[in-house]
Amino acid sequence: MLAIVPLVVAGVALSNFRAEAERLTQKTIATFFDSKAEIWKPPVASAEAVGVQGYTFWPSLLAWQSVIEAAKVEPKSWKPRVGPFYDALEKYFDPGTHAYCAWTYFPGNDDHFYDDNTWAAVACMEAFDVTHEARYRLRAIEILDDFCRKGWDATGTPGGMQWGTKPLPDRSDRTVSATAAGALAALLVAKVHDPKGNRTWAKEQLNWIRSRLSATNGLIYDGLKSPRFERMNTIWTYNTGVPIRAALEYYAQTKDSAYLDWAVRMGNAAIDRSQSPMYDGAVKDLSKRYWWDSTFFVQYLVDGLRLLTAVSGDPRYRTECDREAAYCFGHLRDSDGLYWRNMRLWTIDAATTQSFDQLTGQTTPALAADASERRMEADDLKLPVEQRPMVKTLLANASMARMFWLLSH
């Protein structure tokens, strides 16, 4: 195990990822979980929520994943909590389609995302590994066999996993988010069910990503846009992070070194600060550049890179994860102990933009306020974005908690 060394950002030393993971997970639960209603709920209307009724499935799933990750590191205190937070997700499950809905299930709710459900299968297998309770294994198999496989286009024209089921144009997009998580889910399920079939399917998904969505620099594009299936050229951090983890899992199960080589190529690109996007290209000094998008995407990249160091023995990937985590701790943690969403300080508020200027020695870019960092009550939406009250979200904080737990192994 690699030693965790103190890192200093803005005068703040972060030497114990585990302590911050524990503190933030407890704080996230206290802030966002309604124990009476058994649902993750925002204090005020904000991103990824249905008013103040509750959060949609993805942030709620990530909150459960942060608890699962906690149970891996601190099983005595956190393993008993895996079950109750899983049970809180049951209100989203549609037994007829064998899938989780984007919002709580009701008859006629046809809004299911394949990336939500491939990640749910991954989370269920991780919960099974921690608890050895059969219900998680059985749910992962159910989701994968009875729902997720229906989203896979085996024709290769264009191939890939589609994004969702609702009859809307963008739901037919073929995305890395669904396909890479589908490969990872298939590989984890392969350990307990249909190993040959699931490994074959995972390989098909990984090969589709590598052949159709690899950039020349080694990073991974976002997907193919329906209906013409033209490439979506955005490069999010998770686009590369999840294929790294899936490729490493395939290598671990098959010993096919081509997938380790591919993971290394992706990993090298992901820590190359000259790459923009991947790093914030608005920063001129490469030594001051950090990953460019959002905390809830970055944690997927950390997941892949920390494993790449463990498998390859090259410490550079884990070192960059530590560096980015220290940046988040030093710059994205607000005075209330909760975290902002954006990695780019100049998209949050005036105070973080000033922090960006001090960090980089630049005076540009100017503040470009992101609406997802702001409250979304009806009266708020009448105001210019930069005048809306600031708000913290479950998606950001569950993701940061999971990231700190990942770095505590």
Image (cartoon, rainbow, N blue to C red):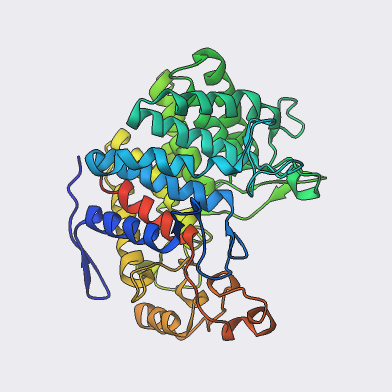
Residue 350, percent from left and from top: 47, 85
Q: Is residue 393 left or right of residue 178?
A: left
Q: Nearer the viewer, residue 107 or 158?
A: 107
Q: Vertical placement of 247 versus 102: above or below?
A: above
What residue sits 35% from the left and 72% below the top? 331
Q: Is residue 401 left or right of residue 343?
A: left
Q: Nearer the viewer, residue 44 or 13?
A: 44
Q: Vertical placement of 147 versus 81: above or below?
A: above
Residue 218 visible in rendering: no
Residue 339, percent from left and from top: 40, 67
Query: Which quadrant is the C terminus positioned in?
Result: top left
Residue 205, percent from left and from top: 60, 30
Residue 111 visible in rendering: yes
What residue sits 50% from the left and 32% below the top? 184
The quarter of the displayed image where residue 155 is located: top right
Q: Vertical placement of 365 versus 291: above or below?
A: below
Query: Which quadrant is the N terminus positioned in?
Result: top left
Q: Nearer the viewer, residue 165 or 27?
A: 27
Q: Is residue 402 left or right of residue 194?
A: left
What residue sits 50% from the left and 83% below the top? 364
